[in-house]
Image (cartoon, helix red, strand yellow):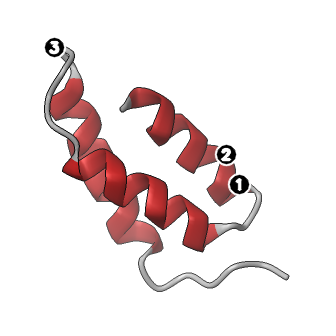
Amino acid sequence: MRQRLEYARTLIELGRHAEAREQLQTSVGLPQAQWDDPVTQEEAAKMLKEIQDKEDKT
């Protein structure tokens, strides 16, 4: 889950918001497997909200 979040951060920096949204949505929907997953999911949901209307850079 944490890896998807970090990958999404990288995609956002590259302007690839659509791909980042996919990673964040997946992260939010995964079942808890690690002790910090609820925090990670909360962070992913926040990031998802922040980029929901952003378009990809061309």
Q: Which residue appears farthest toward the top when viewing the image?
A: 35
Spatial CA distance of label 3 from label 2 is 24 Å
Q: Quadrant of the C terminus?
A: bottom right
Q: Which residue is mark 2?
A: 10
Q: Residue at x 49, y 30 (%)?
A: 3
Residue type of the residue flagged with mark 2: Thr
Q: Is residue 50 above or below residue 42?
A: below
Q: Which residue appears farthest toward the right when viewing the image?
A: 58
Spatial CA distance of label 1 from label 3 is 27 Å
Q: Residue at x 59, y 41 (%)?
A: 7
Secondary structure category for the residue under label 3: loop
**In the picture provided, is 2 more to the left or to the right than 8?**
left
Looking at the image, do the residues carrying marks 1 and 2 touch, with CB atoms under 8 Å apart?
A: yes
Residue type of the residue flagged with mark 1: Glu
Secondary structure category for the residue under label 1: helix
Callout 3: few (<14), some (14-19), or many (20+) C-alpha neighbours within 10 Å? few
Q: Mark 3 or mark 2, which has the lower sequence index?
A: 2
How many numbered marks are there?
A: 3
Instruction: Give residue 40's position: percent from left, percent from top.
Output: 28, 34
Instruction: Give residue 25's position: percent from left, percent from top.
Output: 33, 59
Q: Mark 1 or mark 3, which has the lower sequence index?
A: 1
Give the quarter of the image for residue 6: top right
Q: Quadrant of the N terminus?
A: top left
Q: Is residue 33 above or below residue 58?
A: above
Instruction: Give residue 12's position: percent from left, percent from top.
Output: 63, 58
Looking at the image, do the residues carrying marks 3 and 2 touch, with CB atoms under 8 Å apart?
A: no
Q: Which residue is mark 3?
A: 35
Q: Which label sits on residue 13? A: 1
**In the picture provided, is 56 more to the left or to the right than 8?**
right
